[in-house]
Amino acid sequence: MTQRAENPWLVEDVDQELVERLAALHTPNPRALEMGVDIVGDPHREDDAGHNWAVLSDARSVREVVPGSAVVLGSSIGRYLAKVVSWDFEVSDEDPIVTLELLPVRPSEVERLLGRNRNPAA
Amino acid sequence: MLREEDPPDDLVLVIRACPATRPECVADIVADALRSGRLYVVADPNGRREVLFGISVFARRPGVALVEILARFDMAPAYLEAAVGSLRAAGFGLLPTGVNPDHDDVQLVPGQREEDLEPLAAIRGAADRLVAVAGDLRSNPAYAGVSGQPSEEPS
């Protein structure tokens, strides 16, 4: 861990050793695999700071949901793009809360946008 | 974090943006409350810690368009809403949680201590009651459909 916010449990930047330790303990979340998303969650949830949240065991892969990553969150009411804000270890050392900021753009819109803005063929 | 406020009985809350059927909506509420309960505790009115089997709900304040609240859930075909007074009359506690002044948690099963067994049956029963209090699923005015296609009507 190389950087901490005011809350000492809240980790906004993780070192590779921690990621690898948690990855070794991790089992890919079956729903995340089934849905083809990085992490499963509920877009209604808000924590004290107004962020959405899930837990690391809801993820397909630990390495894909480190703080700073852009992820696809899957839910029963659709997919969301999100940015991982932090990991919060207050409740568990091995299954931290993954704090997320939901982005106000749909994955399908991004696909469409990228589709019409491909680099011109050489 | 609990805000020091007491939502009025006539305040309408958006309880949930939902899939198209009530059973799916109940299942979502149960899953979310269980996840909350495994992570969060709050202090009850006497200062004792109790597990928060909470679900996030959002105030629909006078003058705020419903579509504004539901814009974030534009892939959900349906939603549920209920007045604070109806929820209280049905025995649900409402906790003003977090920095968002329009965000509250509905406590589905109050009085549980951290050492108690997870009250799965009680949570399921409370989720059923909550959906019953909210009444029929309503069409989400923000619904954009999956890939922009028209939706099934909520059942």
Image (spheres, coloured by chain):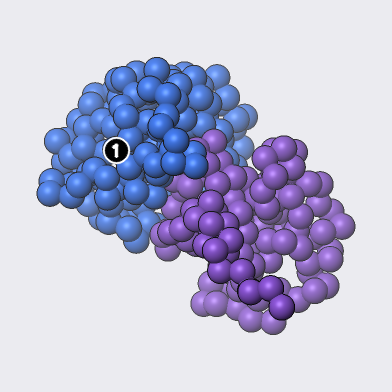
Chain colours: A purple, B blue
Q: Percent x, y for residue B30?
A: 52, 29
Q: Amino acid at mark 1?
A: Pro
| On screen, residue A107 above or below A78 | below
> Could one spot residue A100 in this view of the protein?
no
What residue is drawn where x is 34% and y is 24%?
B137
Q: Percent x, y for residue B85?
A: 20, 30
Work out whether residue A43 or residue B31 is closer to the camera in this orientation and state it.
A43
What residue is drawn where x is 33% and y is 35%?
B140
Q: Chain under label 1? A: B
Q: Quadrant of residue B9?
A: top left
Q: Dot 1 lies on which element?
A: loop
Q: How many dots with numbers?
A: 1
Work out whether residue A118 or residue B124 is closer to the camera in this orientation and state it.
A118
What residue is drawn where x is 84% and y is 64%?
A21
Q: Quadrant of residue A94?
A: bottom right
Work out whether residue A120 or residue B108 is closer to the camera in this orientation and state it.
A120
The quadrant in which the N terminus of chain B is found is bottom left
Query: Pointer 1: residues within 10 angstroms few (<14), some, or many (20+)?
Result: some
From the image, tell me which residue sits under label 1.
B141
| On screen, residue A100 above or below A44 | below
| B154 with respect to A95 (left or right) | left
> Could one spot residue A104 in this view of the protein?
yes
Q: Percent x, y for residue A120?
A: 63, 74
Work out whether residue A12 or residue B66 is closer to the camera in this orientation and state it.
B66
| A1 with respect to B88 (left or right) | right
| B83 with respect to A91 (left or right) | left
The quadrant in which the C terminus of chain B is found is top left
